[in-house]
Image: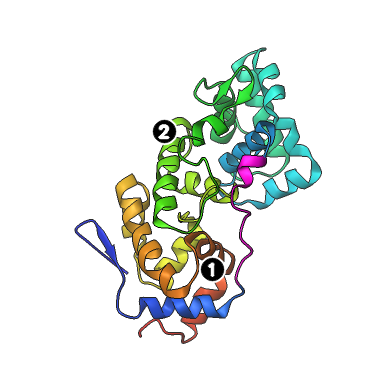
Amino acid sequence: MRVAQGRVDLDPGDLARFAVVAASFPRPEPVPPGRWLHESSDRLWLELVTQLCVIGGRRPLDAMWQSGEITLLALDRLLTIERRGRDTAYWYTHELLARNGVRYVSAGASTPSVKARQIVDAAVSPLLVRDGTFLLHEILAPHLSQPPDWSEASRQRERAARLALVRVVAGFGMKSASDFLKHLGAAQNLIAFDSRIKSVLRDVFGLSEADQRRLVGHTPRYEALERPFVEEACPHIGLSPALLDALLFTNAREARRFFAAGGRRDQ
């Protein structure tokens, strides 16, 4: 891959490399399209909390779901605690996350973590919560009134929904909003460029870390990086962007090892 004048293009052989990756690993199971349309606002709130916490690793959050600890961050509970003071809610959230080993939340911290603050601030945001109810359906419905499919029309709707989330959720960038929508079954045409996928872009497709930083931190540039995946790689290998994302995320280390051991990096 190469970057020139704000555009990201594939190098010769990149489509073949995508095909090798797609042929080398099992296809992931898709998230049921439109899952979020059937979930309660309480469940969707906990999904938002999870997304705000996954930077650094999802495993502690998965454990919190399995143990039931995640329900201790239910919206009604947080709002009740916040009535005793914002700092009280910050520390309650921080200590719960620290107890469960969430990354970047230290048990010995002198101030509440960024993650704890983002969760509580979301709970009291009038853009996200009204009368104790999480407004995700209201935020997304103008853009995603139907389950997504793999198509250009759905892609445009998903892009609009992603931008809406970035505007209203403090702590959400393009990657987080993309990941959140994919996990909810609200998007099939977006890529969440997390650290694992970025490592594949570096080691398999030759896109430098410096170029990646410039791209993923800026909305139009993020979509410029997403474009060759959506418009070229996915049609070539017959996988939707959401499934290619899941395939790369799950198999990033193995894909990098394969090409390092003599795969087709120089085709």
| Residue at the extreme right | 67
User: Quarter-wise, where is residue 137 in the image?
Assistant: top right
Discs 1, 2 touching: Cβ within 8 Å: no
Image coordinates of residue 85 in percent, x first then y, are 63, 14
Question: Could you say where residue 64 lies in the image, as x and y percent from the top left?
Answer: 74, 43
Which residue is disc 2 drawn over?
Answer: 167
Dominant SS of magenta comes to loop
Q: Is residue 234 visible?
A: yes
Q: Looking at the picture, which amino acid does disc 2 mark? A: Arg
Estimate the spatial distance between the alpha carbons at disc 1 and disc 2, rounded to whole Å: 30 Å
The amino acid pointed to by label 1 is Ala
Q: Which label belongs to residue 233?
A: none
Q: Which residues are magenta?
A: 27-38
Residue at 40%, 40% in the rendered image: 163
Q: Is residue 262 above or below residue 39?
A: below
Residue that appears at 46% across and 65% down: 199
Is residue 34 covered in magenta? yes
In the figure, residue 173 lies in which quadrant?
top left
Q: Look at mark 1 in the image and give the residue it sits on.
A: 252
* Residue drawn at the location 54% of the way across and 47% of the way down: 186
Give percent across and percent down for residue 261: 50, 85
Which image quadrant: the N terminus? bottom left
